[in-house]
């Protein structure tokens, strides 16, 4: 299988990067082709220019590459912190520029954009790992868990992904080393469950691509 991994955190020493590294280890060990992007390391430009709005727009080479990768992926993994109930701006910009019409969704013929789109993504599974310093009950009762709505309802379900799994790890700032080790073990087990060895019908050699 071809699995796309996106991590969005400015610190390489963050727990988010530890999560992403755990994902890459298991995916590679299980024989999957991995394409990984560290958006901050790559200095991804999150600003969506007006010229990219239309479905048939000619895209910059970098954005076209991202579009090709997300459209060809059999699975997608997103790793990011909870900032004000939202993804970091750089990841929101990645969604704006890459999860675009003609790539991730389309409107039916005759629909001018006011209707419900049809999902185009090939991926059958999407996994989102989040970190937070807000206690779970407070996040759900006071804030309504906005990241759940964003990733499940507003993005991946709308784009045709059938299986969506999201896990929030908290409270990171006061977590112990033992807790973090346990969380990373859970990450590894989750990846192994969704993307096990031999999941694809044709044998694939590990081919980690990190840009």
Image (tube, rainbow, N blue to C red):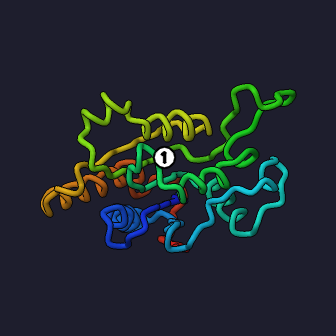
Residue 134 occupies which quadrant of the picture? top left
Judging depth in this view, the residue of 75 and 12 nearest the camera is 12
Judging depth in this view, the residue of 190 and 202 nearest the camera is 190
Left or right: 161 in relation to 138:
right
Please name the residue that numbered disc 1 is placed on. Answer: 126
111 over 81 or under it: above or below: above
153 over 171 or under it: above or below: above
Badge 1: how crowded within 10 Å, few (<14), some, or many (20+)? many
Is residue 30 among what the camera can see?
no
Q: Position of residue 113 (x, y in %)?
A: 78, 31
Q: Residue at x 42, y 55 (%)?
A: 80
Q: Residue at x 74, y 69 (%)?
A: 61
Left or right: 96 in relation to 162:
right
Q: Residue at x 52, y 33 (%)?
A: 153
171 over 64 or under it: above or below: above
> Which quadrant would the C terminus be assigned to in this image?
bottom right
- Tell me the SS state at disc 1: strand
Is residue 156 among what the camera can see?
yes
């Amino acid at each position: 299988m071809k699995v796309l991994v996106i991590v969005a955190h400015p610190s390489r020493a963050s727990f988010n990067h530890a999560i992403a590294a755990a994902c890459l280890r298991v995916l590679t060990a299980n024989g999957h082709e991995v394409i990984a992007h560290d958006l901050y390391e790559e200095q991804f430009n999150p600003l969506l220019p007006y010229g990219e709005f239309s479905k048939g727009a000619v895209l910059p080479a970098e954005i076209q590459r991202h579009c090709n990768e997300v459209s060809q992926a059999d699975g997608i993994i997103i790793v990011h912190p909870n900032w004000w109930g939202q993804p970091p701006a750089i990841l929101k910009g990645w969604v704006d520029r890459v999860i675009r019409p003609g790539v991730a969704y389309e409107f039916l013929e005759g629909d001018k954009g006011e209707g419900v789109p049809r999902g185009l993504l090939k991926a059958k599974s999407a996994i989102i790992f989040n970190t937070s310093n807000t206690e779970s009950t407070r996040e759900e009762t006071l804030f309504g868990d906005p990241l759940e709505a964003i990733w499940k309802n507003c993005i991946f379900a709308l784009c045709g992904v059938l299986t969506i799994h999201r896990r929030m790890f908290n409270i990171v700032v006061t977590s112990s080393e033992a807790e973090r080790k346990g969380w990373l073990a859970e990450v590894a087990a989750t990846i192994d469950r969704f993307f096990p060895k031999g999941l694809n019908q044709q044998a694939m050699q590990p081919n980690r691509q990190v840009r």
